[in-house]
Image (cartoon, helix red, strand yellow):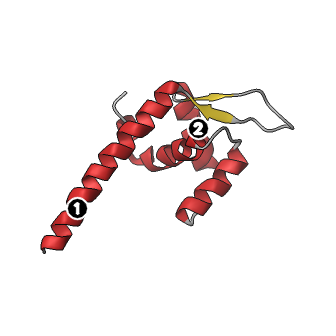
Amino acid sequence: MSGLTEFGRFSEPALLVLVSLAEGPKHGYAMQDDIAALTGQRPGPGTLYGAIRRLEELGLIEALLERERRKPYRLTAGGRAALQTELSRQQAVAGIGLRRLALS
């Protein structure tokens, strides 16, 4: 996988889910809290669970055994690699953009 390009306009929620899970397994509500702390915006359930479903279908995350009626998820090795690829790509783009701004 070469990043999250197949998510199209839904790539940001997917990226945020992967970033949240990079810290360790979490259930949906904990991911919502973590993403809200990171971005200042809490994703709605449809957005969050749509991203979770797509990430799971692609094998980037996997569900763990349900605990206390909550279903936690964790990154797979492929998810970790996709996250690294996407964050590196974004870091490169941000660096170029910041350099260009400094020149103008």
Q: Position of residue 32 (x, y in %)?
A: 65, 53
In the image, is residue 104 above or below residue 28? below
Name, please, the residue furthest toward the left.
103
Q: Which residue is mark 2?
A: 52
Instruction: Please identify, in this view, whether the residue under mark 2 or under mark 1 is nearer the observer.
Output: 1
Q: Which residue is mark 1?
A: 97
Query: Can you see residue 58?
Result: no
Which of these two is toward me, 74 or 49? 74
User: At 57% across and 64% down in the image, what residue appears?
Assistant: 41
User: At 72% across and 49% down in the image, what residue appears?
Assistant: 29
Q: Position of residue 63 (x, y in %)?
A: 67, 28
Q: Earlier in the sequence, mark 2 or mark 1?
A: 2
Q: CA distance from mark 2 to mark 1?
A: 30 Å
Name, please, the residue furthest toward the right.
68
Could you say whether the residue bearing mark 2 is in a helix, strand or loop?
helix
Which of these two is toward me, 102 or 4? 102
Q: Position of residue 61 (x, y in %)?
A: 57, 30
Which of these two is toward me, 7 or 96? 96
In the image, is residue 17 above or below residue 42? above
**Residue 5 in the figure: left or right of residue 70:** left
In the image, is residue 71 above or below residue 11? above
Q: Which quadrant: the N terminus?
A: top left
In the image, is residue 47 above or below residue 83? below
Density class for disc 2 (Cα within 10 Å; few <14, some 14-19, many ≥20) is many
Query: Can you see residue 9?
Result: yes
Amino acid beneath label 1? Gly
